[in-house]
Every structure is written in structure tokens, then in C-alpha cells.
Image (tube, helix red, strand yellow):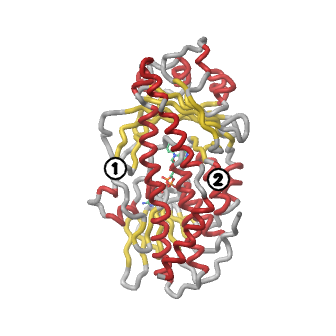
Amino acid sequence: ADRDVGGCGGPKPHIAIVGGGIVGVVLTLGLIKQAIPVQLYEQAQGFRELGAGIAFSACARRCMELIDPSIPQALVRGGAVSISDVEDQDCLRWIDGYNQYRPDEPEYQKPLAQIGGAGFRGCRRDEFLEELSKSLPAGVIKFGKRLETIEIQADGKIILAFGDGTQAEATAVIGCDGIKSRVRKHMYGAKNEVSYPQFTHKVAYRALLPMTDALEVLGTWKANNFHHHVGPGAHMTHYPVANHKALNVVIVLSDPQPWPDHDNMVAEGSREKLEAALQDWHPTVLKLVRRLPDKLNTWALFDLGDYPLPRYNAGRICVAGDAAHATTPHHGAGACLGIEDALCLNILLGQVCSNNNADLNHAVEVAFGVFDKIRRPRTQWLVNSSRRACDLYHQQEWADPSRRVKAETCFEEMRDRSYKIWHFDVDDMVRQTQAEYNRRLLD
Ligand code: FAD
């Protein structure tokens, strides 16, 4: 049943959230709804989400609803649409992206497999974040605050120091500062591998195409319905966003070379290079690629899969979202699971406030310990599963007709993995979170 997370009656911690991406903002809105004092610090001078697409599952949207109903409303206002032209009959659809079936062959339109039930809604990231930001009261977010250090004083106060020379004080810090998290580095130290994401040997190209272009190349059906085109060493994903005015296109290539600069995960790329890499692919894929802009950035896909965090918490400091479990995007679920994190933290901090705790610092420590226990297994599984999904999409066997049946056996596995993500029992997570917090507090 829906629950009202408001009504926080006891003494309240002052929460500092570092990072004003989707997870940081959603978490902040939930704390505001519960009247928990919160300050959000973002290094950029304003919101800086990309004009790229993102999709949220029904499960993630349910979490948003429980955190604050204004969040799914912002998603709708931000132009989110079903990834299928028939509302609530959405499917992920895998199609042969390689050069086996031509448009005049009957198999051409036939997907290799389809799996329904995610309830995905696609939107532009920048438009969603802009709508979300309208619900933030003035002064809650401070821009131009790049976190440099965190210090815990002898009296227990936590001091955050920023690049502009200013400082702030808080009872607790939640790092929502993304894949290169400074908060994570504070927790583990500069010499520890877990402080650094690793290159997964996949690179992505992403673009939004006007729907008119998409319709010309793909036809009405494909342009308005989610498709993964799979093949040896690459795949292309597309789905409609922005009230069906644009097609979100992501192309991922396997790349055996090391990434040259780990400080910079984005490099200048070109459509020419992409075309060369996909030259043997299906004409439809190539036609769509040719509609992309000449200059395209190459996004190196890093994650935290090689050195996962042993804990998401250290005392009254914790990390959530990509800061805790940055993943490759092959399940389209990194932000979705970050939203689940935000719900879990909202439940816990609501509990901290409602129990009239004599020792607020201890209560926050307990809460963050519970967060780690509840969230770490599922989110770290996602990181591994996403890598596996991409390997299945990029199987060399797709190019070999004699091994095609072998390649196709992957879809049963993809169904299981997808269902684990989509059919997560959010209400059970809420129950388990509350029960575990109460149990540990009594210990
Ligand atoms: P971020 O969005 O990275 O935000 C971190 C924020 O912290 C930034 O604003 C940054 O400026 C700020 N920051 C960083 N360091 C500091 C500091 N020291 N001080 C202050 N501020 C700081 N997920 C889905 O669920 N569905 C999808 O369809 C999907 N598609 C994707 C497609 C691609 C190609 C990629 C790469 C990812 C995709 N994801 C998707 C994953 C999703 O983008 C991320 O999981 C999500 O954006 C993470 O949000 P976040 O708020 O945790 O981190």
C-alpha cells in the first residue's frame, strides 16, 4: 500500500548530499517531503544533465511515487513516454543487427526475442532534471560546490570542504557524486582500487534523432518501439523519448584496446569511425548511423565491477547511486536502482527521526549500516549482470549462421536477468529495511 513518508517527529539529523544528479535530487526531494533538514551540494554551476535519453522502469517509478508523488509527475511533464506504441504492452525486443536478413526477406521484421513487463518510460535526462528541480525549495541546492575533503572533528561534527574555499557542517553525508565519487575516495583512500572505476572495454555513442528521420529509416513500427539490434562486437539500442518527438539512439562497440585517459571518460569521436566499425552490418543500422551528427562523442564505459565496494557506509557517511555501484548501461537500470537506493535511505532517515533517538549519531550509523546490507547485494549483482548482458549481445556467433541457434540460447538468460530487475518487490524492501533498522537499534 502507498505510505506517507512524512511526519518526522523526533530530533533531526542535518543531511549533506553531495552531487545533484538524478539520484541526489530525488533523494533530496524525499527528505524535504519528510521535513528532514537537507543541503545538496553540486560542483557544477547549474544542473548539467545531458540532452540524452534515459528510461525508467515501472519499479523505479513506483519508488519515485513512494518517495514523493511530485517525482513521477515531473517525469511525465519532462516528456516521458512508453517505449512502445501500445501503452503498457511494452517489450524489450532483440533483432538481428548484422547482415543476415535483408529488408525484402520475411525474417527481416521478426525479432529474435521479446520480453515484456518492464513498464519503461523514456525521456530526455535534462528535461526530467529540469522538471524535478522545480520542486526544490530555494536555497536547498548550492551550485559551484566541488567537495574536496571530509573531516570528522573530535566532537563528532562532520566538516565538508569545497573547492571554492568554503566549508559546511552536517550530521551525515551521502555521496551521490557519481562514478568518480569524491565521497567514495574519502571512505577508502586514494590508494585503494575501489576508489577508481575500471574500463569495461566497451564504448558508447549516443544521440537523439528527430522522429522524422527515425520514421524514414525505421518505419512507424520500429521507430515507436524499443529495439536492441545485436551482432558481433556491437549493438544498437533505440526507443522514443520527448513525447515521441525524438528517438534515443545508443550504439555500443566492444573495444579491446586500453582506454588512454582514465580521468577523462569522454573523447571526441566521429560518425565516420562508427560507420567503419559497422560496415558489414544490416543496411537499416547503417542508414540510421548515417543520420547521426558528423561529430559524435565516444563514451568509454567504466564501472565498479572489478573492485566492488566492501561496504557502502563508513560511520555517518555513505554512498548511493553511481557513487556506490556505477554500472554499464546494458540493462538500462543504473539510475533505476539508484532510485531504489533513494527510497531505502528515505525510509531509514525517516525512521531515525521518528524514534526520538537520544543518540542521533548512533541512529544514523545504524541506518547507513542497514542501507549497506539491504542495497549492496542487488546493486553489485546488477553491475556484473550488465557486463554479462553486453557480452551476450556482442557474441561473435551472431555472424555465423551455423552457430546462430547457440547464440539465441541467450534470451532465456536475458529474461531471468531482466525479471530480477523489473519485478523487484519494493514493498518488501521497505518492510525489510524498517525491520532490520529496528532490530539493530535494539541490539
Ligand atoms: P550522476 O548522474 O553521475 O550525478 C553525479 C553528480 O555529482 C553530478 O551532477 C556531478 O557534477 C556531481 N559531483 C561529482 N563530484 C562532485 C564533487 N566532488 N562535489 C560536488 N558534486 C560532485 N540508467 C537507467 O536507469 N536507465 C537508462 O536508460 C540508462 N541509460 C544509460 C545510458 C548510458 C549511455 C549510460 C552511460 C548510462 C545509462 N544509465 C541508465 C545509467 C544512469 O545514467 C546512471 O546510473 C545515473 O545517471 C546515475 O545517477 P547519479 O545521480 O548516481 O550520478
Q: Residues within 10 Å of mark 2 (few under 14, many from 20)?
A: many
Side of 50 relative to 130 (left or right)? left
Residue occupied by mark 2:
61
Task: Pick out the residue farthest to the right.
Answer: 86
Q: Which mark is residue 137?
A: none
In the rendered image, residue 103, in percent from the top left (x then y), is placed at 59, 14
Residue 93 in sight in this render: yes
Residue occupying the far top of the picture: 104
Q: Is residue 223 above or below residue 413?
A: above
Near-viewer residue (157 or 379): 379
The image position of residue 153, as x and y in percent, is: 37, 80
Horizontal and vertical percent position of residue 390: 44, 37
**Residue at position x 60%, y 37% in the image:** 115
Q: Amino acid at mark 1?
A: Asp
* Dot 2 amino acid type: Arg
Residue 421 locus on image (x, y percent)? 55, 49
Name which of mark 2 and mark 1 comes first in the sequence: 2
The crowd level at tag 1 (other Cα within 10 Å; few <14, some 14-19, many 20+) is some
Q: Is residue 272 visible?
A: no
Depth order, front residue of 331/71: 331
**Residue in the foreground of this view, choosing between 144 and 120:** 120
Compared across the picture, whether 156 is left or right of 113 comes to left
Q: CA distance from mark 2 to mark 1?
A: 30 Å
Asked if the residue under mark 1 is in contact with the one under mark 2, i.e. CB atoms within 8 Å, the reply is no
In this view, the residue in front, 151 or 203, is 203
Give the quarter of the image for residue 189: bottom left
Instruction: Please give the name of the residue rendered at 57% of the width and 30% of the height, measured from the top-left corner.
Output: 113
Residue positioned 56% across, 64% down in the render: 344
Relative placement, left or right, of 171 versus 103 is left
Q: Seen in the image, is 117 located left or right of residue 142?
A: right
Which residue is label 1 attached to?
Answer: 306
Secondary structure beneath label 1: loop
